[in-house]
Amino acid sequence: MQLWIPFAASAGTLLAIASFVGADWDAPPVESVQIGYRGTGMYLEKDIEKEKALRAANEVPEAPWEADPEGDRASELYENVQVLGDLSDDQFNQFMAAITEWISPEEGCEYCHNAENFASDEVYTKVVARRMIQMNQTINVDWGDHVGDVGVTCYTCHRGQHIPANYWYDDQEPKPASAMSRHGGVGKFVGNTSMPQNALMDYLLEDKSIRVHSLTALPDPDSPNPAGTKETESTWAFMMHMSEGLGVNCVTCHNSRAFNDWDQSPPQRVTAWHGINMTRALNVDYMVGLTPVFPENRLGPEGDVLKIGCSTCHNGVQKPLYGVSMLQDYVDALDKKGPTDVPDFSTYVPGETQVMGAETPANSSALPLQTTVADVAK
């Protein structure tokens, strides 16, 4: 008998045991819910062990107080209020108190403001915050087909952090093995797989076709499918990003017997379609334009701005914050559009620019007419 055989068998046994009891082993039970005919594979799977942690991470904070809509407008009381000027003084201060807790609970007002001149735009985060408020308004007003009446607030993504936990950027590392290779190793934004690591660039920044499904079992010379292996892998990588970001499996949006057929798909597929279009529009219209404002340490390795993906808002659950709306406490701030002017961000100079906006005189002293604790991100 060869001596290596018992050693190999022992090693294999130990490896099998370690895989079952190791820290990364995700043991059953998994909850399955049947949503289609028996035998069609239409089951939603949910990891019960993660549910408790997800519930805790998606608790909704209460509003600091119920704001009074009456009284003088913020634009009459404070200088350099460009987006939220129509709010009452109480609404304005309530929203400033809330956004501080949503994004910079430790630093407070000074994360976005010069404490000696709250109206100044010299702190770059204030310029970013103003544009993000415009983005929230656009989502809630224009993208109801995706966010419904629940809407979004800054907290939907930030959850008390300066930068949302989930974002993506131009991922070029590790480099592909050759110019002919589409794979560069483990793609951190595509489910840690070896699928094309920059697939999100194709669909959430560019507008490449996602559909690769052939309509016939065999090639049809009259209607050839232009998609090849490369396009299929990119689509597969993007679908994994969506699946992980929402904590769902394929049949949440697709019918297992006909992935391509809209008529046989669950209605969630339509919501997801609007979500893909919305996310692309937000990256193109809001995030990319802000690139000159961000310091180098807030950009990706290739110098591009950090971008929005499905996981940025969803954070591992199908409906962000389990569908609980925070918007009713901030209707006038985030569920209505204020001015939509976009300044030339390439002219921004951190530490110097006092007013980042076309309608307000440049190099203004921008001193606040009134300063309160909540006089934060005007």
Image (spheres, rainbow, N blue to C red):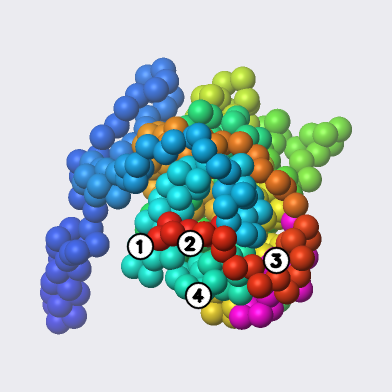
Q: Quadrant of residue 322?
A: top left
Report the front residue among 16 and 41. Answer: 41
Report the front residue among 366 and 323. Answer: 366
Report the front residue among 278 and 212. Answer: 278
Mark 3 in CB contact with mark 1 (< 8 angstroms): no
Q: Please, what secondary structure does the residue beneath circle 2 have?
A: loop
The three-letter code of the residue at mark 4 reads Glu
Question: Residue under circle 3?
Answer: 356
Q: Is residue 349 magenta?
A: yes
**C-alpha separation, residue under disc 3 versus residue under disc 1:** 25 Å
Q: Please, what secondary structure does the residue beneath circle 1 have?
A: loop
The three-letter code of the residue at mark 1 reads Pro
Of the numbered discs 4 and 1, the one sitting upstream in the chain is 1
From the viewer's perspective, tell me whether residue 45 is left or right of residue 339.
left
The three-letter code of the residue at mark 2 reads Thr
Q: Which residue is rendered at x = 70% and y = 31% of the image?
A: 215
Q: Residue furthest top?
A: 37
Q: Which residue is rendered at x = 50% and y = 46% of the image?
A: 89
Residue 105's disc is 1
Categorize mark 3 by other alpha carbons within 10 Å: few (<14), some (14-19), many (20+).
many
Visible in this render: residue 249? no
**C-alpha separation, residue under disc 2 versus residue under disc 3:** 20 Å
Main SS, magenta region, reads loop
Q: Please, what secondary structure does the residue beneath circle 3 have?
A: loop
Q: Which residue is rendered at x = 52% and y = 38% of the image?
A: 71
Mark 4 in CB contact with mark 1 (< 8 angstroms): no
